[in-house]
Amino acid sequence: MMDAQAQETPPLELTETHVVMVVDDDTNTLNALRRALVREPYFVVTSEHPKLALQWIPRRNVSVVISDRRMPEMLGDRFLREVRKTSPRSILLLLTAYPEETMEPPYVTVLAKPWDDRTLRMTLRRLLREREESAGLGPDPEANAPPVPE
C-alpha cells in the first residue's frame, strides 16, 4: 500500500530565481509563513511595515507580494494597489481572515487565514511557474512536440 506522500504530485520545478515579499503587521504570522516556506526554492523577505516594503519593492525584482488585509499602517488593498503601480509584473496575493471583504482587483488570488501550508506552497509554485511561462522562461513547448514531417 502506498503512503499519502508517495501519491502526492511532485512540486513544480522553477527555472528562475524568485523573491517573495510577505507583509503583515503580526510577527507571529510572518514567522509562521517563514517556517512554511523555508525549504522552497525562492527567497522569502518579510516586513511588518507596508510603507517600508513600498520603498524596497521597486528596487528589487519581486516575483510575488503577499499582504495581510488588515494592518494599522495601511490596508492591504491599498498597499497592493501601490505595489501594482511600481512593480507591475509582481504577482499579488492577499492573505486575510476576512476573504468575504475582498472583492476588489488586482489580486491574482485571495488566501484565507488560517492557511494550509501545503496549499500555500503549491499555490505559490503554480503562480511562479505561470509567471515564468508568461515571460518565456518555462519549458520549451516544442521540446515534446512530435516531429514535423518533411
Image (cartoon, helix red, strand yellow):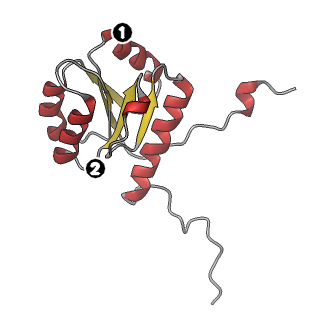
Front residue of this view, candidates 2 and 15: 2
Residue found at x 29% / y 20%:
24
Taking the spot 16% from the left edge, 20% from the top edge, the residue there is 73
Q: How many marks?
A: 2
Residue 110 in the image: x percent, y percent?
42, 35
Name the quarter where the C terminus is drawn: bottom right
Where residue 148 sits in the image (x, y, percent)? Answer: 62, 82
Instruction: Give the quadrant of the N terminus.
Output: top right
- Residue 14 appears in the picture as rendered: no
Mark 1 vs mark 2, CA separation in Å: 28 Å
Q: Residue furthest bottom?
A: 150
Quarter-of-image position of residue 11: top right
The residue carrying pointer 1 sits among few (fewer than 14), some (14 to 19) or many (20 or more) residues within 10 Å by Cα, namely: few
Tell me if residue 38 can be seen: yes
- Write down the residue under mark 1: 28
| Position in image of residue 49 (x %, y %) | 18, 20
Residue labelled with disc 2: 89
Task: Point out the tag, 1 or 2, that comes first from the N-terminus.
Answer: 1
Q: Position of residue 89 (x, y in %)?
A: 28, 50
Task: Please state which amino acid type lies under the numbered disc 1.
Answer: Asn
